[in-house]
Image (cartoon, rainbow, N blue to C red):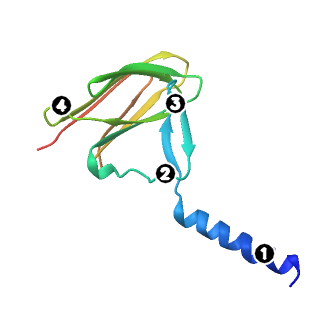
Amino acid sequence: MSVRRWVVPTVAALVTLGLTACEPLDTTTPGGRSTSSKGKPKPTAQSGGTVKITTSNRTCWAGRIGTTTKQGCGSATFQVRSSKGTYTVNLRKTKGADGISVVLVVNGKKVDQGSSSSVVAVSYVSG
């Protein structure tokens, strides 16, 4: 059997296996920049809260996400823990001309969102 007969089915099988076994996982670098990795299971939003910050790479922000202080530049995604059933995000723009958008997702549902050119605060109280 020639090499050509093996190449196409092998490549097709590897691509199919790769697409079904791995989903991209959004993570954040210490500077707040979003990255992507493959091969890790995708976390579910069912287990708590997630905050997604959207802005340009030239816009920087700082503030509190849950009980931790964060800062970064550009878009980022973080896990947020509740404090006695309350999820809070308070961010302010520290540099740049673009605004900041924040979406808060708790247990897989978008519960609050906000955007501003200077300060964004979103929160949710689970009942």
**Whole-Å distance between the Cαs marked 3 and 1?**
37 Å
Q: Position of residue 38 (x, y in %)?
A: 56, 51
Disc 2 marks which amino acid? Lys
**Whole-Å distance between the Cαs marked 4 and 2?**
28 Å
Outermost residue toward the bottom? Answer: 1
Among numbered discs 1 and 4, the one appearing first in the sequence: 1
Outermost residue toward the top? Answer: 94
Which residue: 21% across, 35% down? 82
Please determine whether, in this image, residue 43 is positioned above or below residue 33: below
On the image, numbered disc 1 is attached to which residue?
8
The crowd level at tag 2 (other Cα within 10 Å; few <14, some 14-19, many 20+) is few
Q: Are marks 4 and 2 in contact (CB under 8 Å)?
A: no
On the image, numbered disc 2 is attached to which residue?
40
Disc 3 marks which amino acid? Thr
Outermost residue toward the left? Answer: 127
Instruction: Between residue 22 and residue 80, name the one nearer to us.
Output: 22
Among numbered discs 2 and 3, the one appearing first in the sequence: 3
Q: Tell me if I can see residue 24 in this picture.
A: yes
Q: Secondary structure at mark 2?
A: loop
Q: Position of residue 15 (x, y in %)?
A: 66, 66
Among numbered discs 3 and 1, the one appearing first in the sequence: 1
On the image, numbered disc 3 is attached to which residue?
29
On the image, numbered disc 4 is attached to which residue?
83
Q: Position of residue 50 (x, y in %)?
A: 34, 41
Disc 1 marks which amino acid? Val
Please determine whether, in this image, residue 50 is positioned above or below residue 73: below
Among numbered discs 4 and 2, the one appearing first in the sequence: 2
**Whole-Å distance between the Cαs marked 3 and 4?**
25 Å
Instruction: Between residue 89 and residue 5, name the one nearer to us.
Output: 5
Q: Tell me if I can see residue 108 in this picture.
A: no
